[in-house]
Amino acid sequence: MITIDDNSPHRMRQQKALDFYHACRNVMQADRTARLTEARVVQKALEMEAPRYYVTDEYAQKVVHRMLKGRMEISAYGPKADQWREIMQKVRHVRSTLGVRTEEAVWRVLESKASSYFVSPEQAYRLYLRGKNLMRNNNRKEAI
């Protein structure tokens, strides 16, 4: 039997979908005019902060160490590149202000809020649908 811990990529994907779905629900509840399409709800939710970064500790440690040693640069554009730029900026800030080791700084950053969900609009819509499906399945399990 395979066990899935809270820091597994699978669990991160599920949590991201659920969190994004909740952000979409918050958008819908805040604007009860009923003029919002699903696409507009998803777009508004994309502009919100995310409760955390959806990256495993191990992967973040590897990427941050490579970047600090100059073995990896972020020259690409897009949501994921923006995410790593933000993580690196925060890691450097935490290290310099608190004087902690890189591992500790990465952990603190990963547990902090992210400025966005760092996904494209298309991926955001898929996240919304996945979160909606996960919520539906969870509600069915609770009813049994």
Image: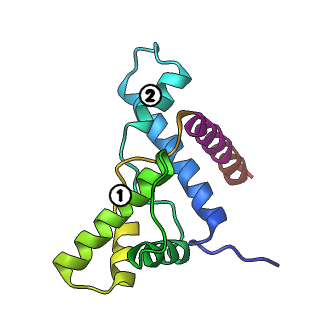
Q: How many marks?
A: 2
Which one is closest to the eye, mark 1 or mark 2? 1
Q: Which mark is residue 28?
A: 2
Q: In this picture, is 65 found above or below 56?
A: below
Q: Magenta region: which residues?
A: 122-134
Task: Give how far apart the Cα atoms at labels 1 and 2 are.
Answer: 28 Å
Name the one closer to the observer, 25 or 44.
Answer: 44
Q: Which residue is mark 1?
A: 86
Task: Tell whether 68 sits left or right of 130.
Answer: left
Q: Quadrant of residue 87?
A: bottom left
Question: Under tag 1, what secondary structure?
Answer: helix
| Residue under the point 42% across and 74% down | 70
Q: In the image, residue 88 lies at what x, y percent?
A: 36, 66
* 99 lies left or right of 9: left
Query: Can you give x and y, in whole percent of width and height, for residue 57 in the image?
Result: 50, 75
Q: Amino acid under label 1?
A: Glu
Q: Amino acid at mark 2?
A: Met
Q: Residue at left 38%, top 76%?
A: 68
**Foreground of the two, 137 or 86:** 86
Relative vertical location of residue 56 with respect to residue 20 in this rendering, above or below: below
Q: Residue 119 colored magenta?
A: no
